Amino acid sequence: MRYILIVLIFLGQFQAASQQSDFLKEADSLNAVGKTSAAIALLESNSDQSEKTLLRLAEYQKKSNLKEAALANYQQVLQMNPNRVLTAMDYGELLLDTDKPEAAKKLFSELSEKYPENASFRFRLGLAREKLQDSSAIDDFYKTVELDSTHQGALYKTSKYELRNGRHFNAAALAKKGLEVNANNASLLSILGQSYMVSFQFEKAIEPFQQLVAQGESGEFILQNLAKAYTATGKTDQAIETYLKMIELSPGNASAFTNLGVLYFKKDENSLAREAFFSALELKNPEVDNEYVYIGLTLKNEKNYQLAYPVFLNALKENPNNERALLEIALVADAFMEDKKTILQLYENYMNRYRGSGNPSQLELADFRIRDLKKELHMAE
């Protein structure tokens, strides 16, 4: 009789397990064809709310953005079985995702204490503290790197911290450590590129920014840094191409037009330079004196001195402290005006304003012309 009872109990348990398995398979099938809501309803209607059922239910609820319901089911599973470490991880991540950092901090603090060698728990403890604006979060990120020297998230957090605090060599070292494992990590490539930029290693900065663009990470910030690196290393054509991409992405970026104009000017492509500077003028407000200076210089290059003269006057009107504009007024006047006394006065205006404080080469040029003009005027008397 006892043997029969044991067999019946075993068969009952087997049948229940089989029914549960069929139930879960049916829910999985519904989910697989996009009927996740029906799968959730089926699981909720099941009288046997076992750990497996609740976990599957939480998974589908999370997928359907029913995050609060998913949290409740994860919590119920952990009450039934506190030793489910992976479930605790999923629960904690969802707490972070639903902006419950205090609860996440408590959970990951307990898990980190119980499993002190687990880098993932320590990292998520740092994320919770970071959300709470707790400055000790960075200590958790450094501890994570200590536990797992290749942890991508922690290497990003620590390298970013080093960069922000002016320790660009440390930032680059941490970023490179992560890139050894995942060479396409966009966040670490960006940190590496920025580290090279702030330490004036422009040639080295080019590669990480190029890689980001190749990966489709061609935002305005990335393109701007790449263009600056190209410019600083004399790669003018590549810099122009990059600024054109930047303008295509952000047509209202006045600085991009200005920098593009400067590059065209360096190549003596005066018409293209003027076009870029005029575009910058239309966008930039209120300080546009430098754009006027460059437009004047393009006209001066083409020996259109009479057209350049009023442009330099406009630059000085925009900014009375623009030293280059004041000198250029005298230089272009010198090229087309016949009244040498007026020209001399323009040079002296510049010298009187900037003697002892201006650009040495510009002061030398003005002084040379003043002495020449005085000789010419003396001989003409």
Image (tube, rainbow, N blue to C red):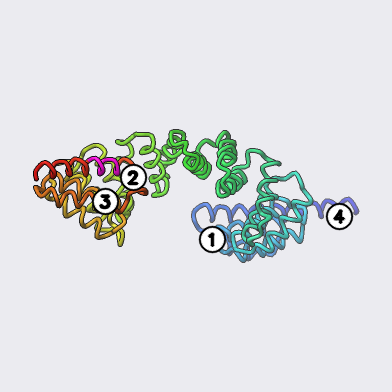
Numbered disc 4: secondary structure: helix
Camera-near label (1 vs 4) is 1
Q: Earlier in the sequence, mark 3 or mark 1?
A: 1
**CB-based contact (under 8 Å), mark 1 and mark 4:** no
Camera-near label (3 vs 2) is 3
The residue that disc 3 covers is 350
- Segment colored magenta: 362-368
The residue that disc 1 covers is 64
Name of the residue lying farthest toward the right: 2
- On screen, residue 136 versus residue 332, left or right, reads right
Between 272 and 7, the residue placed more toward the observer is 272
Q: Is residue 197 depicted above or below 41 in this figure?
A: above
Q: Pointer 1: residues within 10 angstroms few (<14), some, or many (20+)?
A: few
Q: Earlier in the sequence, mark 3 or mark 2?
A: 3
Q: Is residue 12 visible?
A: no
Which disc, if any, is residue 359?
2
Image quarter of the C terminus: top left
Q: Is residue 43 depicted above or below 28 in this figure?
A: below
